[in-house]
């Protein structure tokens, strides 16, 4: 038998190399773009609005505007045009990443002691209920900014789904009824709010349709005139007149001066994954990276459940201590970001962690943490070009300040309660505030909102949740679950626990700790606080770059919706 010549072998090897190279390039090209687009949000109507915009040729940023505006209509207990938020953006064509800061600002007439009585004591409820509790909203400016700078479609088209929802109305569900019952008294105190959000001055029946004609007109004004349609002109005058008539301190100058700020996101690493998260005035990115840095010193997979849980709790305790002592609006106070997110700082914090004993919070330096609202919303989006958005929005307490300036349809936030009304004194949640987060005119209150991207060679996660001061620990647990190899359904549904330094207790959902684990944690010195109900409403997406599969998930605790669509951008 005649054997092939060495030259033939060489050509065969070269041909095989070219075939492998072509396959690798093909796989690379497939991995460079997800095969579908996906939206996960806290309400099915908002998710549908985002998918409709994507189907019309919009990108993830257009869809983010549509979803934000739709949530402002159908989830008034969580977000709205009268609130604020953070939008974390990734642009695929140049890997540009930015955090759009649309957080509320304190009015220019705000003072450090505005919620104290003549004796210097905090007046209960003054920073929560009523127009004096409202900061200057940032959502309208953020929607205009994102649409015009990053979107493909006209602003009018991106706002059209929300305008239609406001004009035609949406049906009340169980979540709406529960939130309205919780805030019934302050809603009844404001005639305009009661007319819109209640039914005959009571909690609406399930299926009752909430129609918001004034809000539709406000959205149309923004769609037509951009920022000027909200922050100047006729609508601005209505807002200021309504706020002042209700005891607030807004001015036309407050509205005219509002600007969104583009901020550089914070970045960290954990077990081969790149973490991209929110920068101040959010505390989310700082605390999240600090916790992951501390946990990177442990092989968590090798620890028994009790020891692993203990170590995670201790990392939470220390990160929240830093949050209390150092964090505020970085435009007003110096925040040592590089140090707080460094591995050296994490090692220093972690030195005091003992595997068999809890560290009392009183043994750590400092003794404050800050107030934080409990109701918020989050959504995650990826389009078929790989653009992505993680956005967390809020009006603070459910239904915000429960005040609507007549003729505007705009439900005011009560984000001023996120400031420290009096450093060292507890707020409505029993939490106390720090000096860095004291009230100043034009300042943005500290937040825990933590829209986050997690990226590795394997894939990309888009994750975030509402939940007040528990937001950061929920995102942490989701990332740890991702690192363990679990998928989006697991991240959004796993039972949660939380420690925030003060009060010195471990809060946990029903089912999070069994009796044996509770006993082991108590033996280590932890004070446990079981919760009667669940918390959070996580919305997440994972794009597996190896298989191309895109998997969105919506938290089963809420009424949200996660969808994928075979949409290719034009």
Image (tube, rainbow, N blue to C red):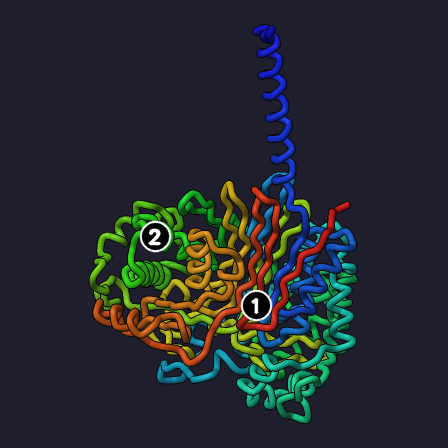
In this orientation, which residue lies closer to the viewer: 108 or 524?
524
Which residue matches tag 2? Answer: 301
The answer to whether residue 318 is seen in the rendering is no
Q: Is residue 274 left or right of residue 245?
A: left
* Other residues around mark 2 within 10 Å, as few (<14) / some (14–19) / many (≥20): few
Query: What secondary structure is found at the residue carrying circle 2?
Result: helix
Image quarter of residue 410: bottom right
The quadrant in which the C terminus is found is: top right
Q: CA distance from mark 1 to mark 2?
A: 32 Å
Mark whose residue sits in front, 1 or 2: 2
The answer to whether residue 355 is seen in the rendering is yes
Residue sitting at x 67%, y 69%: 44
Residue sitting at x 36%, y 51%: 340
Q: Is residue 541 left or right of residue 491?
A: right
Q: Is residue 345 left or right of residue 3?
A: left
Question: Is 389 drawn above or below residue 306 in the view shown?
Answer: above
In this orientation, which residue lies closer to the viewer: 303 or 420?
303
Which residue matches tag 1? Answer: 377
- Residue 28, label in figure: none
Question: Is 37 drawn above or below residue 171 in the view shown?
Answer: above
Residue sitting at x 77%, y 64%: 160
Instruction: Residue 315 in the image: state x and y as whole percent.
Output: 32, 58
Answer yes or no: do the residues labelled 1 and 2 have beta carbons within 8 Å?
A: no
Instruction: Residue 334 in the image: state x and y as whole percent.
Output: 40, 54
């Amino acid at each position: 038998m005649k054997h092939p010549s060495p030259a033939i072998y060489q050509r065969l090897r070269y041909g095989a190399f070219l075939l492998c190279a072509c396959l690798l390039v093909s796989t690379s090209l497939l991995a460079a773009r997800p095969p579908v687009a996906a939206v996960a949000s806290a309400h099915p109507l908002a998710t549908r609005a985002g998918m409709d915009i994507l189907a019309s040729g919009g990108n993830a940023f257009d869809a983010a505007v549509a979803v934000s505006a739709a949530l402002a209509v159908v989830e008034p207990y969580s977000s709205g045009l009268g609130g604020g938020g953070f939008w974390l953006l990734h642009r695929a064509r140049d890997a540009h990443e930015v955090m759009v800061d649309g957080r509320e600002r304190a009015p220019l007439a705000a003072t450090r002691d505005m919620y104290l009585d003549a004796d210097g004591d905090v007046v209960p409820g003054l920073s929560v209920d009523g127009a004096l509790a409202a900061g200057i909203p940032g959502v309208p400016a953020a929607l205009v900014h994102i649409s015009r700078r990053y979107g493909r479609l006209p602003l009018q088209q991106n706002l059209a789904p929300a305008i239609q929802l406001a004009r035609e109305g949406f049906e009340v569900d169980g979540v709406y009824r529960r939130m309205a019952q919780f805030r019934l008294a302050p809603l009844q105190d404001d005639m305009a709010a009661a007319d819109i959000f209640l039914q005959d001055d009571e909690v609406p029946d399930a299926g009752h349709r909430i129609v918001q004609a004034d809000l539709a007109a406000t959205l149309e004004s923004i769609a037509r005139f951009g920022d000027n349609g909200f922050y100047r002109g006729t609508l601005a005058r209505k807002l200021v007149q309504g706020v002042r008539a209700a005891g607030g301190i807004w001015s036309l100058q407050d509205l005219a001066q509002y600007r969104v700020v583009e901020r550089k996101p914070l970045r960290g690493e954990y077990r081969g994954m790149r973490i991209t998260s929110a920068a101040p005035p959010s505390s989310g990115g700082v605390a999240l990276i600090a916790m992951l840095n501390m946990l990177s010193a442990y092989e968590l997979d090798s620890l028994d459940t009790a020891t692993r849980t203990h170590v995670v709790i201790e990392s939470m305790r220390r990160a929240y201590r830093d949050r209390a002592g150092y964090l505020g609006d970085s435009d007003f106070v110096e925040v040592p970001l590089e140090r707080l997110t460094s591995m050296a700082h994490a090692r220093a914090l972690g030195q005091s962690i003992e595997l068999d004993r809890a560290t009392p919070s009183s043994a750590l330096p400092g003794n404050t943490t800050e107030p934080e609202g409990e109701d918020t919303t989050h959504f995650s989006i990826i389009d078929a070009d790989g653009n992505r958005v993680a956005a967390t929005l809020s009006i603070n307490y459910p239904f915000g300040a429960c005040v609507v300036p007549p003729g505007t349809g705009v439900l005011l936030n009560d984000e001023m309660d996120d400031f420290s009304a009096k450093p060292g004194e507890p707020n409505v949640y029993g939490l106390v505030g720090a000096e860095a987060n004291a009230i100043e005119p034009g300042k943005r209150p500290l937040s825990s909102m933590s829209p986050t991207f997690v990226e590795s060679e394997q894939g990309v996660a888009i994750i975030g949740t509402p939940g007040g001061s528990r937001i950061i620990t929920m995102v942490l647990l989701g990332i740890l679950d991702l690192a363990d190899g679990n998928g989006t359904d697991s991240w959004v549904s796993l039972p949660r626990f939380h420690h925030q330094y003060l009060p010195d207790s471990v809060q946990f959902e029903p089912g999070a700790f069994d009796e044996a684990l509770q006993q082991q944690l108590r033996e280590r010195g932890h004070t446990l606080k079981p919760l009667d109900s669940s918390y959070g409403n996580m919305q997440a997406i994972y794009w597996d770059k190896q298989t191309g599969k895109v998997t969105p998930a919506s938290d089963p605790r809420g009424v949200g919706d996660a969808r994928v669509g075979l949409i290719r951008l034009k």
